[in-house]
Amino acid sequence: MIALERATKPLKGDICVPGDKSISHRSIMFGALAKGTTEITGFLESADCISTIECFKKMGVIIERALKPSNGVPMLTVHGNGLNNFTAPDSTLYTGNSGTTTRLMTGILAAQPFDSMITGDSSIEKRPMKRVMTPLNQMGADITSLKGNDCAPLVIKGGKRLHGITYRSPVASAQVKSAVILAGLYADSDTVVWEPALSRNHTEIMLSAFGADIHNEVARDGSSAAILHPGMPLHGIRINIPGDISSAAYFIVAALMVPGSELLIRNVGVNSTRAGIITVLKQMGADITLLNEDNSTEAKADILVKYSELHGNANNCFEIGGKDIPTMIDELPVVAVLAATGNFDTVIKDAAELKVKESNRIDSVVENLKAMGADVEATDDGMIIHGGKPLHGADINTHNDHRLAMSFAIASLVAEGTTRILDDACVNISYPSFFKDLQSLL
Ligand code: S3P
């Protein structure tokens, strides 16, 4: 448990947030699938990404950590096995709390010559896996759910010949897209994954840097395809991972809420498939400027954010929905916190995916905002927040969801009295130094 009080002064200064979680997972996975060595700096050393490392170590991949002699920066070296040289794991692969590890690994395991089983913690064992089982089995894989509930543990039979498919995913999900594309690397023909809107495209960008023939096409209606021609050899590369915009989001919101604040968050990934929070908050009147933009491979920038009086639109309401949702899906809990402090209503819609994250984030956000005195109601695909009610401290039930713990730690900065985050250790999933970094600004 950690007890937090209202901020007594503006938040000022420069900070760096840890490396991007999605890119960190992929750097290990694709490094393992490639031939040769991949050197990674900026890697996020959090529980989720360590789950990915452990899974590959169990399949015979050598991954080393050292400090770079030139500058003392931690560097991971992955000695890639290549697509076809993994060893059969001697026990079930354990993915902890990580949906990305579970779903992307399933795509890789589907194509291996050996049988395997994969599962994670109690949250992972409740999350939907049919969304990857269906397309992978269409490709010729043999994946079943051990308990017959379409959830992990997943039992994967090896030795299957996979063929390319054109798959239309009903949800915009980078995990589904990536699982199918990774299996597609082993298929005998092209794999095309359509999704209703472009989800984060780190897989496409990074696989292409490793040598794969893959690209995105966006149709006029906004639906998007990832198209892979298999057969190109993957070779090890150097990767420098930028800070995670999902982690930066907590400090962006903190600076916008606490009067007089001004923060510079350095070297953050601002790939447009991830940066919806910046676009949407600017529409709400947020004073956010991107500095030192670098658009090579994964776009990055320093983010300057200043306290701002936010506003709704003409009828004093602000709507967040449609194609913006996949570009800020993980930031919606902290955006909901911010919305509760504005003098307008906010409607979050088209976000039913929130129900199947590490917790049911519609219910868990609404429950805790209510506990802090906000006027908020859950809907089928999001929530309606009637802003402007003063927040007060409360006991926050995070449901062991890292993003809940951090979002409500930020809420505490403008709440009267003490806010207690009951199971604060869950921040280790994506941001182990979160409370230390927050404290350094108070
Ligand atoms: C992720 C994709 C998103 C996101 C998750 C990380 C990824 O999930 O919520 O935190 O790294 O591919 P979905 O693919 O389920 O939308």
Image (cartoon, grey):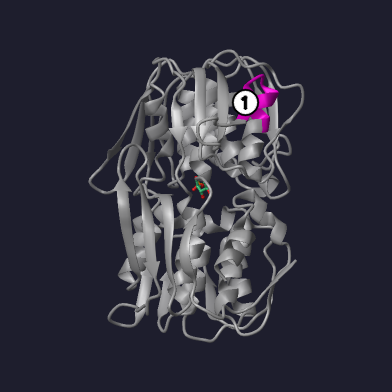
Relative to 322, is 152 on the left or the right? right
User: Is 29 situated above or below 416?
Assistant: above
User: Is 90 situated above or below 389?
Assistant: above
Q: Residue at x 50, y 42 (%)?
A: 22
Q: Splitting the image into 4 quarters, where does residue 7 fall?
A: bottom right
Q: Amino acid at mark 1?
A: Ile
Relative to 99, is 286 on the left or the right? left
Total count of labels: 1
Q: Splitting the image into 4 quarters, where does residue 424 fall?
A: bottom right
Asked whether 61 falls inside the magenta stretch, the response is yes
Which residue matches tag 1?
63
User: Is 415 situated above or below 51?
Assistant: below
Q: Residue at x 71, y 57 (%)?
A: 425
Res 320 seen here: no
Q: Splitting the image into 4 quarters, where does residue 81 fall?
A: top right
Residue 399 pos. (x, y %): 69, 61
Local crowd at mark 1 within 10 Å, few (<14), some, or many (≥20)? many
Q: Residue at x 53, y 44 (%)?
A: 21
User: In the rendered image, which quarter contains the N terminus?
Assistant: bottom right
- Between 257 and 438, which is closer to the camera in this rendering? 438
Q: Residue at x 51, y 53 (%)?
A: 17
Q: Which residues are magenta?
A: 54-65
User: In the rendered image, which quarter contains the C terminus?
Assistant: bottom right
Residue 113 pos. (x, y %): 62, 14
- Between 278 and 255, which is closer to the camera in this rendering? 255
Residue 245 pos. (x, y %): 45, 53
Residue 344 pos. (x, y %): 40, 82
Res 313 seen here: yes
